[in-house]
Image (tube, rainbow, N blue to C red):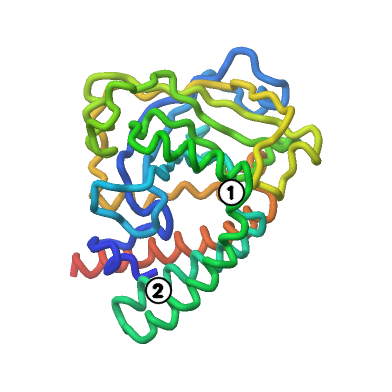
Amino acid sequence: MNSKEINKTHFATRDAHSKTYAIIEGELIMNEELPDFAKNIFKEEKYSVLGRFSHANPKISYGKSIIPAYGFSIKINKSKNEIINLPLVNFPIFPVLEPSEFLVFFTLLNKYWVARIKNIFDAIFVFSQLIIQSIKLSKNLFNFEFIKHSLSIFKHRKDFILSFSYHSIGVYRLGNYLIKLKVIPHDLFSKFKNVHSPKKGIENYLKNKNISYNLFIQVSENIKQQPINNLTKEWKNAEWLKIGELKFPRQNTQNIHDEIWENINFNPFENPDYILPVGKIQQLRKETYKTSILTRNNINITNNETKNL
């Protein structure tokens, strides 16, 4: 994706969640009582954490009216050479059963934005393909779970970005167990409703207050009720277990316009072997992550070298 021109930035941006609202620093404090399989992995009382709040759109929007499709990515520093990346979103399910269909749509969308800049005739052709793929995708959206969560997001569309719960995209293998993850905020942030843009709201809140989230895992024990490849429904009959608390003290948020933050990735496929994404959607995302990060970082490194000549 030719993101510099599309997003009007001086550096290449991410292919998804391109708009950064805040980069914050904190720590993960582990629960004293953990399941045995988690105790063997999280042996320390606490770990330093880096968090990134973002918007899901691959194209940066500069308007005030946006769909509240937010992301909260977490980087847990277990040691110098051992880092856990957990990209989370505020929508608990994936909209389509076949992730390859969504990937085709996403690729066409990127091609269309590039073509609009370079060649209007190519843009018209790609747009026609995009319409066809959109129609194919739309049949997946008329299911109870998707409609229920979409209505909930619409109802809370003006809520403060920190007030949402955030969920893992798909399933992870934690040791020998298959899990999902989510974080839930302590504070309801009700007084920030309709007052601030996401970026300004986070900055203003963190100048005066701490924020914290409970970190939960959900374990799959029955593949029919807690499937790995069907992400269009939430898992049934699986308890959420609290394993820790994310705490972010009062702070001045990082300068999000510094491209050093654009070159930091939250790629879950670079995690240690004991906590890796699994399932069909994850395998599709794996190559996308790899290509996107490599391309973005190479462009930005080249840009910096050119500036220094």
Residue furthest toward the top? 32
User: Residue 158: x and y, percent?
Assistant: 33, 36
Q: Residue at label 1?
A: 94
- Mark number displayed over residue 244: none
Q: Nearer the viewer, residue 29 or 70?
A: 70
Q: Is residue 82 visible?
A: no
Q: Nearer the viewer, residue 113 or 134?
A: 134
Q: Which of the 4 image quarters holds residue 256?
A: top left
Q: Quadrant of the C terminus?
A: bottom left
Q: Are marks 2 and 1 in contact (CB under 8 Å)?
A: no
Q: Nearer the viewer, residue 71 or 177?
A: 71
Left or right: 79 with respect to 217? left
- For label 2, the SS is helix
User: Residue 241: x and y, percent?
Assistant: 64, 22
User: Residue 170: x and y, percent?
Assistant: 62, 45
User: Residue 154: x and y, percent?
Assistant: 42, 40
Left or right: 145 with respect to 248? right
Q: Amino acid at mark 1?
A: Phe
Q: Residue at label 2?
A: 112
Q: Nearer the viewer, residue 113 or 273?
A: 113
Q: Which of the 4 image quarters holds residue 237?
A: top right
Q: Amino acid at mark 2?
A: Tyr
Residue furthest toward the bottom? 121
Q: Is residue 23 visible?
A: yes
Whether residue 149 is situated above or below residue 297 in the rendered picture: above
- For label 1, the SS is loop
Left or right: 43 with respect to 156? right
